[in-house]
Amino acid sequence: MNKRIKELRKYLQYNQKQFADALGIAQTSVSFLEREGSNVTEQNIKTICTVFNVREEWLREGKGEMFNQLSIDEEIVKYVSKLVQDGDQLKKDLILTILKLDAEDWEVIKKIITGLNSNKKR
């Protein structure tokens, strides 16, 4: 399990401090969790699975997919939450602008996306 915790962290492109901050633990605790043979508590497992949407079976046994499948709504909430925490004002402004579009604006965007997709298929 220790190797899978490290694999997850690297997959997420987090350093140990970022991973620790997301879990609400000390960086030294992440180092301990990743060390082969270290004991991972039930609380650690539950927290990792909840915070990062990891399948418990994968974390414990390495079976199946790493992540639980999210609905489109859950995925939107996840990324918007991350965006808000990130603090990048440009990204926030872009999302806010998109959310304020009216029906006519959405039709224009739909035509642009449709055009881009049809160009990719050629």
Image (tube, rainbow, N blue to C red):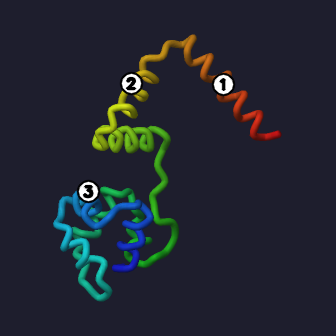
Which circle marks residue 60 in the picture?
Answer: none
Q: Give whichever of 86, 66 is nearer the camera.
A: 86
The picture places residue 64, in percent across and down from the top left corner, at: 52, 70
Image point (42%, 28%), residue name: 94
Quadrant of the rendered image containing residue 95: top left
Residue type at mark 1: give it.
Ile
Work out how far the residue at label 2 is from the one at label 1, CA to CA, in angstroms. Answer: 20 Å
Q: Residue at x 46, y 23 (%)?
A: 98
Question: Going by the picture, which residue comes out furthest to the bottom?
Answer: 37
Mark 1 crowdedness (10 Å alpha carbons): few <14, some 14-19, many ≥20:
few
Spot occupied by residue 77 in the image (x, y as percentages of width and height): 38, 39
Q: Name the amino acid type tagged 3.
A: Ala
Q: Using the numbered discs, state the Cα–Cα distance from disc 3 to disc 1 in whole angstroms.
A: 37 Å
Q: Name the secondary structure under disc 2.
A: helix
Q: Earlier in the sequence, mark 2 or mark 3?
A: 3
Report how far apart the C-alphas of labels 2 and 3 lie in the structure: 25 Å
User: Which residue carries the number 3 mark?
Assistant: 22
Element under label 3?
A: helix
- Which image quadrant for residue 50? bottom left
Image quarter of residue 78 = top left
Q: Nearer the viewer, mark 3 or mark 1?
A: 1
Q: In the depicted view, which residue is nearer to us: 36 or 45?
A: 36
Q: Which residue is nearer to you in this view: 31 or 4? A: 31
Label whose residue precedes the other's in the sequence (2 or 1): 2
Q: Quadrant of the C terminus?
A: top right
- Figure check: 75 above or below 17: above
Q: Is residue 56 left or right of residue 37?
A: right
Which numbered disc, 3 or 1, marks the residue that appears first in the sequence? 3
Residue at the spot 24% in from the left edge and 69% down from the top edge: 44
Q: Residues within 10 Å of mark 3 (few under 14, many from 20)?
A: some
Q: Which residue is mark 1?
A: 112
Circle 2 is placed at which residue position? 96
